[in-house]
Amino acid sequence: MPPAEQEGRILLAINAIKTKQITSVRKAARVFDVPRGTLNARLCRRVQMGTTYTKRFRMTKLEEESPSGVQAMANTLVSERGEVTPPLPVGKNWLTAFLYCYPELKMKYIHKYNYKRAKYEDPKVICEWFNRFLEVKGQYSILDEDIYNFDKTGFAMGIIAITKVVISSDTFGKPPLIQPGNRE
């Protein structure tokens, strides 16, 4: 499927040929900077591949327009369609082709981390901890000089990772994916 700007130039070239402003396909392709083969095919009433919907697609139009475009979901939809012969699963490049056909969706990396960690990022919980810390510090008369930071020697193991998801192209930033699970 040609980009939108090229599609516009193709339509202008077709219009120029039909209104007899330009007489040859070769000249129109050169003037409007479009592929001559594509222009010739469109003049012969061959439609743009992305605008048609044929049996060669694995999913129906309604199934393809569902909000989540993950491969497992696509395979489930295809297998539960109720056909006599079991359908083949969608290919490994299906998601890339799906995103190409729907520019309102995009692929983005998001950070995944433990649910307990996300729960303790709440400002109320943090304030409560510091209030308790100040109470203990005052109760036992601990001076600021006697407080040390030992975090530099520790490490955390667990399911913190980066993953790739399909989101709306209007979304900005990298939203975190909160993942329930245990830390080792």
Image (spheres, rainbow, N blue to C red):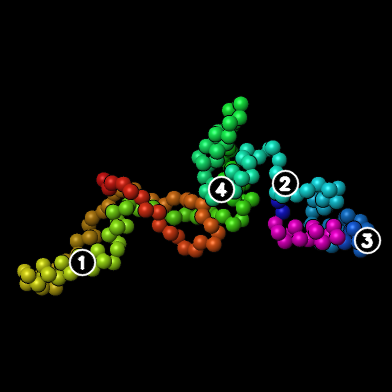
Q: What is the C-alpha distance between the residues marked 1 and 2?
A: 60 Å
Q: Is residue 74 above or below residue 35?
A: above
Q: What is the C-alpha distance between the residues marked 2 and 3?
A: 28 Å
Q: What is the C-alpha distance between the residues marked 4 and 3?
A: 44 Å
- The tag earlier along the polypeptide, 2 or 4, is 2
Q: Give, as a three-letter code, the residue at label 1.
A: Glu
x and y, in percent, of residue 46 in the image: 81, 46
Residue occupying the point 88% across, 55% down: 26
Residue picked out by circle 4? 66
x and y, in percent, of residue 44 in the image: 86, 47
Residue occupying the point 66% across, 40% down: 57
Q: Residue 52 carries which label?
A: 2
Most common SS among magenta residues:
helix
Q: Residue 20 carries which label?
A: 3
x and y, in percent, of residue 77 in the image: 55, 38
Q: In this view, does 26 lie to the left or right of 117?
A: right
The answer to whether marks 2 and 3 mark residues whose Cβ atoms lie closer than 8 Å is no
- Secondary structure under badge 4? loop
Camera-nearest label, 2 or 4:
4
- Secondary structure under badge 2? loop
Residue picked out by circle 1? 128
Counting other residues with Cα less than 10 Å from the Cα at mark 1, is it few (<14), some (14-19), or many (20 or more)? few
Camera-nearest label, 3 or 1:
1
Camera-nearest label, 1 or 4:
4
- The tag earlier along the polypeptide, 4 or 3, is 3
Q: Give, as a three-letter code, the residue at label 2.
A: Thr
x and y, in percent, of residue 36 in the image: 83, 52
Q: Give, as a three-letter code, the residue at label 3.
A: Lys
Q: What is the C-alpha distance between the residues marked 1 and 4?
A: 43 Å
- Secondary structure under badge 1? helix
- Read off the magenta span: 3-15
Counting other residues with Cα less than 10 Å from the Cα at mark 4, is it few (<14), some (14-19), or many (20 or more)? few
